[in-house]
Amino acid sequence: MAERKSLAQDLFEDMGRKVAEANAQDADEDGTKVVDVIESLCMNCHEDGTTRLLLTKIPFFREIVIMSFECPHCHFKNTEVQPAGEIQQRGAKFSLRVDKPEDLSSQIVKSDTAIFRIEDVDLEIPPGRGQLSNVEGILSMVAQDLEQKQDERKEVMPDVYEQLQGVIETIKQMASGQKLPFKLTVDDPAGNSSIEPPSELYAGKYSRQEYPRTAAQNEALGLGDTSGEAPATEIRPEYHASQMYPEMPAGSMVNNVDEDDIVENQVYSFPATCPGCTKTCTTNMKMVNIPHFKQVVLMSTVCDHCGYRSNEVKTGGEVPEQGRRITVSVDTKEDLSRDILKAESCAMSCPELNLSVEPGTLGGRFTTVEGLLTQVRDDLKSSIFDVGDGGDSMDSQTKNKWTGFFDKLTSAINGEVKFTIILEDPLASSYVQSFTAPEPDPQIKLEDYERTEEEKEELGLNDMKTEGYEEGHAAASEATINGS
């Protein structure tokens, strides 16, 4: 395979041309420089070097600052990328399965707070320098970093050298496309990293999950203030919670969950911590009985300080013996109004729309078919086109391909095309409303299937013991007593 340059190298090489344009024309139409050039101290020879700063927008992400340093005395060079936006309200985790050579050109944005993993070799790169590259480029950089001081290891620790050399060769084969498939993940608590979605989506190919940060992650990001005191000024007054939801009762937050048994259609409240600003907020919970299905719990969190809001659906009951696959045909506009419950463990796909949603991507949602597709479209569209006119570096062919995909998805939402929704839930906790209940609906097909070993392991079912666990606990206690 011919050697290709990474997207980062292309951007940095292009900066020289933009610097010349900036010097010829000191300002662009908006009155701002294209590239800022400043003198900086070289940390290698301690002479004066030059740093170029470029603020740009990239597809599938947002604004970033590209920094390139060069020293004319010792010829030391360094490049970095930093997000120009703020820390997001939720963390984000991306995964990509690279199974064909074209995937090696998928763009990757790794911020300085992100953890990069090559799952197949169990290699983890901790948070560090921010990078803008593609799959091939970032794998090549990882291999290059690992090769440093290999000669010294060969002399001092030959065993470690042999093991590490095997990993380096494997990564090089991945970067050149000789060893496929493999899986990459980027986990960023700040939510400022990204992996470009592939043009073809199918089960296990690509996933994007948002999650609330833990207290330790907030502290690591400098958001560890959990005093509960409201800020002097609101962080986002335009998104004040009272404008979208009824205001919560004044005074101390209530906790009425333990007062009585939880009954249907009654709202319960308990204190929580906002994952956005770490201040105290309230989570509301309500149990609803879905006819011909089961009881579910609706949970909604609203922060009155920063305007953060989220809602999820949790299903209860025992774990069934088998998973369930639901196939529903959407033929008319009336079918778009079917109630649909997509559990967090459920994967969704629409073959006619070339759409695949991995488990956990949207969390638990109780809405309609139209509402679910609208949320998928808006979330995906905002991550791709919410950077000006599609981003500075998106080529016209890719842009036209995504535009056609969103046009077809919009036609499906408007009821202009027929399509099929397939919900595959290993916990059988998802549901689609039947228009002929309790009689079978001819447009809905229900199938029970055996869970795979991978699904059992991911759900923790292999380690779950519901019978005879008392005996194991008693044996462990007796062994402890005898040992003491």
Image: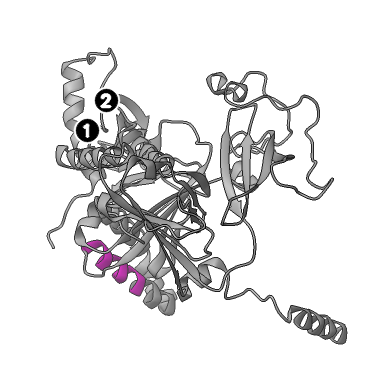
Q: How crowded is mark 2: few (under 14 residues within 10 Å), some or many (20 or more)?
A: many
Magenta part of the protein: which range? 166-176
The residue under label 1 is 15
Q: Which amino acid lies under the numbered mark 1 shown in the image of this protein? A: Met
Q: Percent from the top left, x then y, of residue 161? A: 39, 74
The residue under label 2 is 35
Quarter occupied by residue 444? bottom left
> SS for tag 2?
loop
In the rendered image, the quadrant that contains the N terminus is bottom left
Q: How crowded is mark 1: few (under 14 residues within 10 Å), some or many (20 or more)?
A: many
Residue 188, compared with residue 422, is above or below; it is above
Query: Could you tell me if residue 51 is visible in this image?
Result: no
Q: Nearer the viewer, residue 401 or 17?
A: 401
Residue 240, compared with residue 45, is above or below; it is above
Most prominent secondary structure in the magenta stretch? Answer: helix
Taking 52 as reference, is 359 left or right? right
2 or 1: tag closer to the N-terminus: 1
